[in-house]
Image: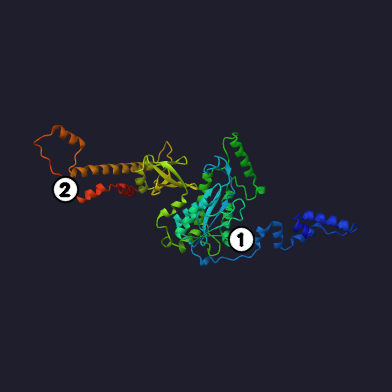
Amino acid sequence: MENKYLGERLSIRLVYQALLRDLRSLEPECARRPSYSAVRSYLQQLPKPLLILSREGKRQFQERCEPYLLTDFDSLLPNQIWVSDHGQHDVWVRNDLFSRISANAAVRPWLTAVIDMRSRKIVGTAWSSSPSSHTISSALRVSIENFGIPQTLVIDNGKDYEKIGRIDFSPECSGVLVRLGIQPQYCLPRHPQSKLIESWFGTIRKRFDCLWPSYCGSNPTDRPEPCIDALEEHQAFLKGKRKSSPLPVASEFIATARQWIEEYNSQHPHSGRGMSGRTPDEVFDELLPPGQRRLIESPEVLYALFWDRQRRKVSEGGCVQLYGERYEPADGESLAKLFLEIERNVLIACDPANLGEAIALDLDGRFLGRLKAQKLITRGPVSHEDIQASMRIRHTARKAIADYVGGLSRIRARAGDRTEIAHLQDRAEMPETKELQPPTSIRPRDLQIAANPDFIDDIVRELTEGE
């Protein structure tokens, strides 16, 4: 019975039938045979580790039976160890974001996340249709920009995921880690560090993914019926037999997932070791206040993590066209610099996993400014504040340039310079009695202004005061 049940992995009913067959062949006249309930009771009382290893596999045995070390979370500090890994959502969505996949195609998005080991706070995220080293770079950039520099970054070795394989750091990401003094390392196979973020992926699947009608579950054989119906209706939509699809669009799903993660960080009372029922935000801020975090000295160090670069021409307002969207300067200083590049080619570096932002570089790779996807204003009722902000930016840029040009005219006048028309009139009339006036003295400050024309500071100052 044990050989049939553990070795051949037969069901208890098939084991019982095989037992009766063998007993009949050995003792045809034997009337006393064991009952089915007795066989079932015997097999179910076998040691659990034996059942798990033989019937459920090595992975389940390692996760549920093998001993492991407990992490002393109280000895850690926030930003001491970050762990990054990929997890696939158990929800089907309709593509409206991901490149290399046709529009409206059904896809299960992947989430690359970075979690702080001490506080269990999710510090960085990036969504994609297929995870890679670039999504790690994207999530890492978001994490460092918002919460500072960690001591160690750990990523999973990928051996548990045959579809992905080992995910190495990209050359750009490796260079940033070295420059910032971050120690990169891979998790040891079956090491509890990898379980930290894997268990969180289980949490988001159970508490967030299951809320969607297109939730598919973790096992295709147990796929909920509403998901099956939704996929069938979506196929009819792709064939033109339906006007709409029941699948949520990817952008809506990701925006909602980002909100859920923010609320998880700020509102979820964690019962894990060292948490004492506090939220991840509470532990992170208490043990590592903002003033004690090791922040990047200059954002330029992270530019290498914007890995996709394209040449674009700057249009009116310092804007560029990228991925079918219009991107505008994100702040006053960026507006001032990009305003000078209108109708010139620049390099736009963007993160395809976070298309809401980008940076502008000159053709030599020098930083010009930050860009953000422009908010589209619906024709009809327009926000009064939006109109005022737009008009203030236009007025500031126009006034700064007009002041600069007017300043040049005043400096030339004080220096005794005259317009070309005046010179031409002088040559036409040539009055003999006219005495030329000596030029007025030029102050050193005037020469400095003329030699170093720069009205960018004026634009930045006025925009900042306007904000």
Q: Residue 67: horizontal and vertical position, in percent?
A: 63, 65
From the viewer's side, name the closer residue of 280 and 218: 218
Q: Residue 397: horizontal and vertical position, in percent?
A: 32, 43
Secondary structure at numbered mark 2: loop
Decide: is 228 above or below 299. above
Q: Judge whether residue 464 can be spotted in this image.
A: yes
Give the Cα distance between marks 1 and 2: 81 Å
Decide: is 48 above or below 215. below
From the viewer's side, name the closer residue of 359 and 355: 359
Task: Give me the disc on residue 190.
Answer: 1
Decide: is 38 above or below 414. below
Query: The disc labelled 2 sits on which kind of residue?
Result: Ser
Report whether 438 appears left or right of 44.
left
Provide the residue designation for mark 2.
Answer: 441
Mark 2, Cα crowd under 10 Å, few <14 / some 14-19 / many 20+, is few
For the N terminus, which image quadrant?
Answer: bottom right
Q: Residue 335: horizontal and vertical position, in percent?
A: 36, 45
